[in-house]
Amino acid sequence: MNYIVSIIGRPNVGKSTLFNRLVGRRKAVVHVTSGVTRDRIYGDSEWNGVQFSIIDTGGFSILTNDILEKEVKNQIFVAIEESDVILFLIDIKIGILDADREISKILRKCKKIILLVVNKVDNGNSIINSDTDFFRLGFERYYYISAINGSGTGELLDKLIEIF
Ligand code: GDP
Ligand code: MG
């Protein structure tokens, strides 16, 4: 059985950066402005001999980070359906926006396993003052990572394959 993990989050939180890191090749398009990756992108990954597939859901909205476009929501619903585990990415640098709350509302209703992944923790110190909002989203398990420098991603992957 091939496990499927999807990376979900509002535009610009670092989904494609994480995807590329986990897949190990530049398959997804990463761009400073959102709105580049339009479809779901699939990649294969492996950790400690366990193989799984990853879905990068596109960053669609070129308009705003605050309002989720219908297309984004549809992508989220499809990805949820297909996945065994969902990585819900948020951005510690920006904090929680309405779009994050909207996504968390959708995710809380679904029956899949969700790991809240706080991204852009490039330096562990930034956790200290900013994490209270994240707790309020209502997810049990969260992980601090930097998709750019890879810190925390080993622990996240350890957890992931433990769940399978
Ligand atoms: P997506 O829209 O969610 O797919 O986000 P991207 O992966 O395209 O990343 C959006 C921006 O955030 C890019 O400029 C990335 O370089 C940046 N970014 C992604 N991960 C990190 C991280 O861990 N730390 C920092 N500082 N920036 C990041
Ligand atoms: Mg992207």
Image (cartoon, rainbow, N blue to C red):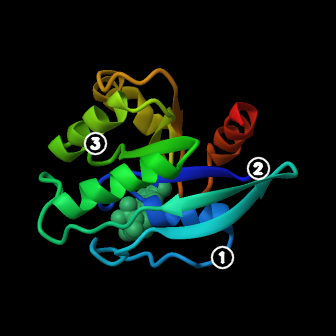
Of residues 161 and 81, which is closer to you in this image? 81
Find residue 104 and report its horizontal and vertical position in percent.
30, 35
Amino acid tagged 1: Arg
Front tag of 2 and 3? 2
| Residue furthest right as drawn | 49
Q: Quadrant of residue 106?
A: top left
90 with respect to 161 (left or right): left
- Residue density around tag 1, few if under 14, some if 14–19, many if 20 or more, within 10 Å: few
Amino acid tagged 3: Ile
Q: Which residue is mark 2?
A: 1
78 with respect to 86 (left or right): left
Element at label 2: loop
Amino acid tagged 2: Met
Report the residue at 28% width, 27% height from top: 133
Find residue 89 and report its horizontal and vertical position in percent.
42, 46
Find residue 92 and report its horizontal and vertical position in percent.
36, 43
Q: Which residue is mark 3?
A: 103
Q: Quadrant of residue 59?
A: bottom left
Q: Which residue is mark 1?
A: 25
12 with respect to 25 (left or right): left
In the rendered image, the quadrant that contains the C terminus is top right
Q: Which circle's residue, 2 or 1, is located before the other in the chain?
A: 2
Q: Are marks 2 and 3 in contact (CB under 8 Å)?
A: no
Q: Marks 2 and 1, how far apart in space?
A: 23 Å
Q: Marks 1 and 3, how far apart in space?
A: 28 Å
100 w.r.t. 110: above or below: below
Of residues 147 and 7, which is closer to you in this image? 7
Find residue 19 and report its horizontal and vertical position in percent.
55, 63
Residue 94 in sight from this viewpoint: yes
Element at label 3: helix
- Residue density around tag 2, few if under 14, some if 14–19, many if 20 or more, within 10 Å: few
Report the residue at 67% width, 39% height from top: 160
